[in-house]
Image: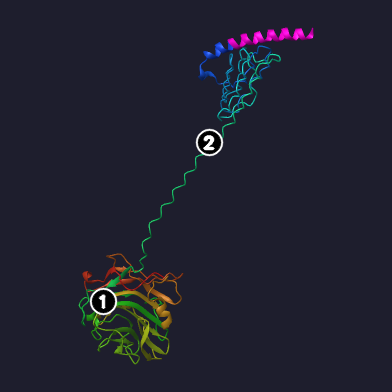
Amino acid sequence: MTTKRRFSAARWIGRSALLGGLVALGCSSNEDPAQNNGGSGGTGATGGSAAGTGGASGASAGAGGTGGSAGTGTAGTLTGGAGSSAGAGAGGAAGSSGATGLSGAAGSAGAGGNAGDTSAGAGGIAGTAGAAGMAGASGAAGTAGAGGTAGAAGATGTSGSAGSGGSSGAMNCKGNALSLSSNIDGGSDPAKSRVMVDFMQSTDLPLGNSNRTIEFWAYVLTSSWAGENNTIFEYGDQSTANAGYGLDFGGQNATMDPYTNGSCDNDNQASGLTEAMDQWVHYAMTYDGTNVRLYVNGVAHSTKACTTLATARTQLSIGGNPRGSYFNGTIDEFRVWNVARTAQEITATMNVTLAGNETGLTAYYQFNDAAGSTTTVDSVTTGGHMAHDGVLMATMNSQRPTFIPSDAPIDCP
């Protein structure tokens, strides 16, 4: 009796499965594929002639990706499209019954998409399995589509390399120079173009028998070699013995006259230069209490013993002397020190500009003043220093010294 009841129940369930399958088939054939977004369940068991084994309940929705469609059976196949990654997929419709339908092939895994709801899809509408049956085994549940791997982030564009800065222009420390071109190459110069610096209220200009160095660059012309007619600088009293201090050109070929207007004069000293060309020359005239020396381009070319120097207080004249002898070339980097500099010290700085605060520096004229200026600035920067600016002078205003670009051999420190 138990066996017959099971057989009748199986037959009834088989018929019900067949009717459910036909309904499901009819509905699925009219369904817009674009609307099949729920995850399909596994194929329902197709009804067998005996009693089909129950189809597995609808597979859970793919974590992302659309599930593979279920394999069709011989008689009424349940096609359960795998759910897209939306919410939980609806269960696949129950397979229609038929003659021992082959079980639907397992749906292939849906392509990975955006991860969907991980809850299981609802069971197929008629997906409850028939009781045992001989018909094909239920289709394997479609493997849930693996969640799509997130697209690799686009590689961050490498930032453009910073534009290389324009190469800085070479620093020019030459600046300007003082041009005395209004002066002639002989004596009794009518222009008397020069710079006068007032030290009457200052001790910054070395006086008496004190140590000192006066140094500068001079652009010497071939016409400058006129004996005692092209004084480059001078200060002190020229009417009293050894009360003056200055530099002029000698009366013999390429010689120089470092003078004190007395017994410490040392005229016609060889300079090591030639008169055959215009040239920049560095001069440094020193006094150390016992000797007056003249360095030409850093080399001592004149030494005169002197212990009676008595330089008087006057203005400093750059470019000539008040008696009518004036230099006709160009001067740059004029420096006054209250120490007797050595040859090594002179050569160490003669080709570079100074900071202005060097020990012993008491006046410093670079002549970097603007065109048209009637004064030249004292560039000493030592704290507490009283500046001694120079005044450009001449017989007529049009004959005053001018500031021109320098091409002296001077570099930055």
Q: Main secondary structure of the magenta part?
A: helix
Task: Read off the residue under disc 1.
Answer: 329
Asked if one can make out residue 341 in the rendered structure from this viewpoint, the answer is: no
- Front-lying residue, 356 or 49: 49
- Answer with the quarter of the image where residue 287 lies: bottom left
The location of residue 132, given as percent across then percent down, is 71, 15
Residue 372 lies, in percent from the top left, at 27, 65
Q: Is 54 on the left or on the right of 151, as rendered?
A: right
Q: Identify whether 51 is placed above or below 249.
A: above
Residue 400 at least partly seen = yes
Left or right of 354, for residue 75: right
Q: Which residues are magenta?
A: 1-22
Indicate the secondary structure of the residue bearing disc 2: loop
Instruction: State the quadrant of the N terminus.
Output: top right
The amino acid at mark 1 is Gly
Identify the disc placed on residue 151: 2
Q: Amino acid at mark 2?
A: Gly
Let me know if residue 4 is in the magenta part. yes
Tell me residue 170's x, y (percent): 36, 64
Q: Nearer the viewer, residue 407 or 257?
A: 407
Crowding at mark 1 (Cα within 10 Å: few <14, some 14-19, many 20+): many
Q: As displayed, is residue 338 above or below residue 303?
A: above
